[in-house]
């Protein structure tokens, strides 16, 4: 049986351990916030949200800074794990560290987005060709179209929401995806954040499909010609084939 002094000592040790853990979290959060608070670094991260590796020169232009300053910013982002670098010949190319970084950027945009102007009623559909209409979020589809597809997949019974912002693929959903040439693990009904999750959309303020399934779906829709990259930005176009396909298979008027 513990005496009062021993019990007090044990409590003090636990309390100190908790305090150290709390201090560590506070420092980690503050340091991450400082990195993202710099406009030049924020511009670079947004440039990399397309999911493609980009040379330092393009990132410097996007951030409106000199190449030397861009290198300093990139070094800090790499050290924090937000960005990775790889050398190809004489050049270095930069990309987001992982999809979780893209989720953080998108989530911060959701938090910081100002309310819609005007009478407070948001338009049902943004202008064609705009980032709000359709864009890449790291390597999956976002914007009005991304959310509309995600809503349709749930409405048709192919996806179900699960705990922890995950999506579970139903049996008929697995069949639907595989008929489109999109492979889904056999344990489709098991919710898995890495396979399928809800990514907050900063323009629609509702989730679109992310995770391995979201990435694979984006690639396959591109191969089928249902969507196409604009080439100049993260905006995504929807050709006639895509409009017909989304109407036929998901009952979406694009």
Image (cartoon, helix red, strand yellow):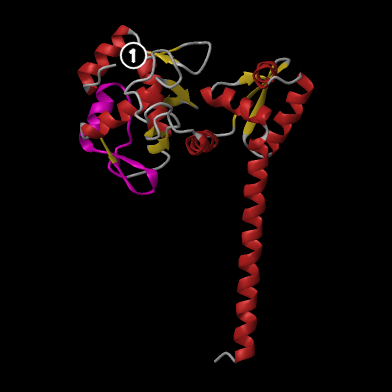
Specify start and end residues of the magenta stretch as a single range: 161-190
Specify whether 208 is left or right of 6.
left
Residue 109, image x, y percentages:
51, 34
Q: Which residue is mark 1?
A: 226
Residue 189 among magenta residues? yes
Residue 86, image x, y percentages:
66, 25
Q: From the image, which quarter does the C terminus lie in?
A: top left
Q: Residue furthest right?
A: 68
Q: Measured along the vertical axis of the image, is residue 8 above or below residue 51?
A: below
Residue 184 among magenta residues? yes
Residue 228, image x, y percentages:
41, 12
Specify whether 135 is left or right of 145.
right
Residue 247, image x, y percentages:
23, 17
Residue at 46% of width from left, 23% of height from top? 136
Specify whether 28 is left or right of 111.
right
Residue at 46% of width from left, 16% of height from top? 235
Q: From the image, which quarter does the N terminus lie in?
A: bottom right
- In the picture, residue 58 is in which quadrant? top right
- In the picture, residue 167 is in which quadrant? top left
Q: Measured along the vertical axis of the image, is residue 8 above or below residue 59?
A: below
């Amino acid at each position: 049986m513990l005496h009062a002094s021993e019990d007090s000592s044990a409590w003090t040790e636990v309390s100190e351990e908790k305090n150290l853990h709390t201090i560590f979290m506070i420092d980690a959060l503050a340091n991450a916030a400082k990195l993202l608070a710099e406009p030049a670094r924020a511009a670079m991260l947004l440039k990399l949200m397309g999911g493609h590796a980009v040379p330092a020169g393009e990132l410097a232009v996007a951030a409106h800074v000199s190449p030397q300053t861009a290198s300093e910013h990139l070094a800090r982002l790499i050290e924090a794990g937000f960005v990775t670098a790889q050398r190809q010949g004489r050049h270095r190319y930069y990309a987001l560290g992982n999809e979780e970084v893209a989720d953080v950027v998108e989530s911060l945009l959701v938090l910081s987005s100002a309310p819609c102007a005007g009478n407070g009623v948001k338009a049902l559909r943004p202008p064609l060709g705009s980032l709000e209409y359709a864009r890449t979020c790291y390597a999956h589809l976002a914007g009005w179209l991304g959310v509309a597809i995600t809503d349709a997949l749930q409405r048709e019974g192919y996806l179900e929401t699960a705990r922890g912002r995950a999506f579970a693929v139903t049996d008929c959903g697995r069949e639907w995806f595989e008929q489109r040439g999109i492979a889904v693990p056999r344990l489709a009904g098991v919710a898995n954040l890495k396979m399928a999750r809800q990514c907050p959309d900063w323009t629609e303020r509702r989730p679109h499909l992310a995770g391995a399934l979201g990435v694979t779906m984006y690639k396959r829709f591109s191969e089928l010609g249902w969507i196409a990259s604009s080439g100049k930005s993260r905006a995504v176009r929807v050709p006639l084939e895509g409009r017909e396909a989304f109407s036929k298979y998901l009952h979406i008027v694009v």
